[in-house]
Image (spheres, rainbow, N blue to C red):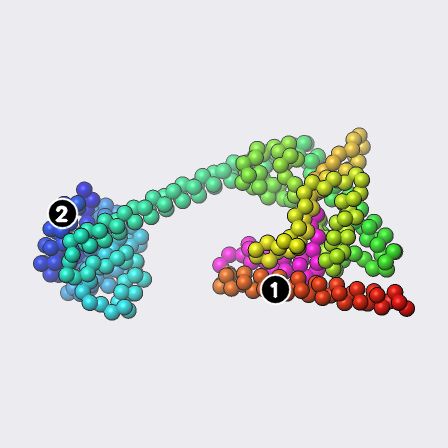
Amino acid sequence: MQKILVVDDAALNRELLRDLLADEYLVDTAEDGEQALRRLSEEGPGMAALLLDLNMPRMSGLAVLEEMRRLDWTQHIPVLIISGEYSPEVENRCFELGVSDFIHKPFESSIVKNRVRNSIALFDYKKHLEQTVEEQAQALKQQKRIIQMQAEQLKTTEAFNRLMMEYRAAIMEMETRLQVLNADFSHAYNRNPFESIKSRLKSLTSIYEKLGRRGFPITVESIRENLTDVAGLRVICSFPDDIYRLAELITTQDDILLVREKDYIKNPKPNGYRSLHLILEVPIYLSNEKKHMKVEVQFRTIAMDFWASLEHKLKYKRDVDDADSIVRQLKACSDSIELLDIQMQAIRDRIDRSRSTK
């Protein structure tokens, strides 16, 4: 049987509660707060619950709660307050100090038993969850250590370094093709379809974390087969129609294969993210062979890219005050950006039409 401690300066209350709970628990009693703390110190985490009166001589129930909180005992022992008539302020203070529930006078047998039983069960469930979370955290740490060891071993191999060289070659190939289109477009229409290109090769840590998260083996072959964003480019355009024009020009080249398209401009993510994502297979020409490599190309307007940069900071920065409010503001900004891009595009079209008539 589990042990509980009843603390009340009134002997009648102690005996009533002992009689009510004796069928299910070993009931110990204390006459005041100081005695209660000594019993708790002796029993430690072995105490299943504490029933505590607030108005007691020498040391009040609130003082007991404050000391228990200081010692971190309220995290391990459910406390139920033996309550007469108390103000909402007192009850709120009790909950702030970690109280689980209240047992009101006069005592009703079934209510007392259910409140004690439920408080103990909820605490046991909480401890079980905490233990499960801790075990999972330790397992994840161990998995991460294993992945890091595998990564360190793999990055020294010739096969891995060659694969990264091939991805770098694919980035250079895509950058060259985009620059050629930009130059051709500038010659034909006297303006550039994009403002800048940013490229990146996925870091070793990110590669292995993604493989591990998806349950894929940590091998060179697995990287090639299962990841599509090791090589990435971000193309920043002035206007939305330039995005679709460039995407069409790239994907219709006869030696480039469109693997997948995700249009987050026409179908934004719930948080407001807007961008056109293409997964392409791009040919690279090596000294002794031709290969097709996967490259992720993201197209955004200048305003979309500015928004995404700010949202990325929120996503990866911890302890941001009122994060929910910032998320809502960012969503509103995304909607405004869509309207702004459309308006700016319409103004550009008016200017172009005006020039063509002169």
Residue 155: give x, y in percent of width and height: 63, 36
Q: Which residue lies furthest to the right in this view?
A: 358
Q: Mark 1 points at which residue?
A: 333
Residue drawn 69% across the image and 55% down it: 300
Residue 102: give x, y in percent of width and height: 23, 59
Q: Does the magenta stretch include residue 165?
A: no
Q: Mark 2 points at which residue?
A: 22
Please tell me whether residue 155 is drawn above or below residue 41 in the rendered image.
Answer: above
Placement of the C terminus among the 4 image quadrants: bottom right
Q: How crowded is mark 1: few (under 14 residues within 10 Å), some or many (20 or more)?
A: some
Which quadrant holds residue 157?
A: top right
Residue 169: give x, y in percent of width and height: 75, 40
Placement of the N terminus among the 4 image quadrants: top left
Q: Is residue 127 left or right of residue 237?
A: left
* Foreground residue among 156 and 349: 349
* Foreground residue among 21 and 354: 354
Query: Could you tell me if residue 200 is visible in this image?
Result: no
Q: Does the magenta stretch include residue 302?
A: yes
Residue drawn 69% across the image and 35% down it: 163
- Sequence-wise, the earlier of marks 1 and 2 is 2
Which quadrant holds residue 158?
A: top right
- Magenta span covers which residues? 297-319
